[in-house]
Image (tube, rainbow, N blue to C red):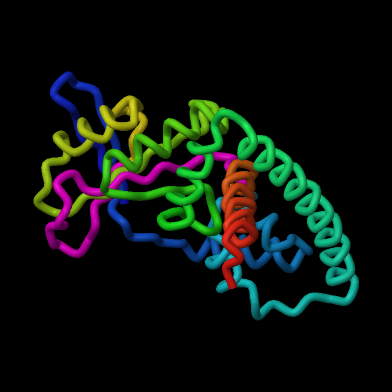
Amino acid sequence: MLSTQKYVDGSTYDIICCVKVHTKTSIKRLRELRRSGHSINELVSVLSVPKTTVWHHVHDIKLSPELKAILREKQGGSLRRRQENLELARERAKGLLSGNFRELAIAVAMLYWAEGSKRACEFINSDGKMIQTYLFVLRNVLNVPEAFLHPTMRIFSGMNEKKCVSYWSRITKISKRNFTIRLNDGGKRGRTEYGMCRITVRKGQSFLKTINAIRDRFFDEIIQEYNVQ
């Protein structure tokens, strides 16, 4: 559910209450596309619906042998592209770990390993210094375009929305107008002073692969150097 609020200067921002609703029409469309031979990933892309939601609504659909063959061909092409992208990420990770930004690359990989999403390039935390460090590396080491960075602030009932969004805007150096604000629907105040900030990198799969490749390569270095069993 979306509501629009105003800042003191008259500009507006949106607040989203965390209730996800999928209409009968959207579910019907989802199932129709699946029956026509769309893959799970294609449905996610076309309808902007999470993969888990897609799977929940289409896993019981029986496909003809012809459509199954088409999907296998698509999966084959996807696997090749995925492997090519992984190789590119590994090469980039190798270059970063042997270059001037080695420490920063390791730092962001470790931060992401602990706090990042496994399926999308998303990092969330209530610690402003963590968010600042993460964004610094995205911008200055991984060269993520500014337009790809999308901030979401999660706050709790009773928290000062304007104070919180002003804080995260200053921390992230992103305009308050670009924030999505989510209110938890539990009616309880969180323990954090400013809520939590999530940074989503749009079209971020290549950056996520690079971060994961840095993590894996650094882990292998530790194993070799210290002979960890």
Indicate whether residue 188 is drawn in magenta: yes
The residue sitting at the top extreme is: 9
Q: Position of residue 23 (x, y in %)?
A: 46, 62
Residue at x 89% of width, y 69% of height: 69
| Majority SS type along the magenta span | loop
Q: Is residue 123 left or right of residue 213?
A: left
Using the image as rendered, state which of residue 222 and residue 28 is in the foreground: 222
Q: Position of residue 194 (x, y in %)?
A: 18, 44
Residue at x 53% of width, y 61% of height: 25
Q: Is residue 104 left or right of residue 43?
A: left
Q: Position of residue 140 (x, y in %)?
A: 50, 26
Using the image as rendered, state which of residue 206 and residue 151 is in the foreground: 206
The quadrant holding residue 99 is: top right
Magenta stretch: give its range: 181-205
Using the image as rendered, state which of residue 74 and residue 199 is in the foreground: 199
The quadrant holding residue 129 is: top left
Q: Is residue 218 left or right of residue 174?
A: right
Residue at x 35% of width, y 40% of height: 131
The residue sitting at the front extreme is: 226
**As drawn, 163 above or below 52:** above
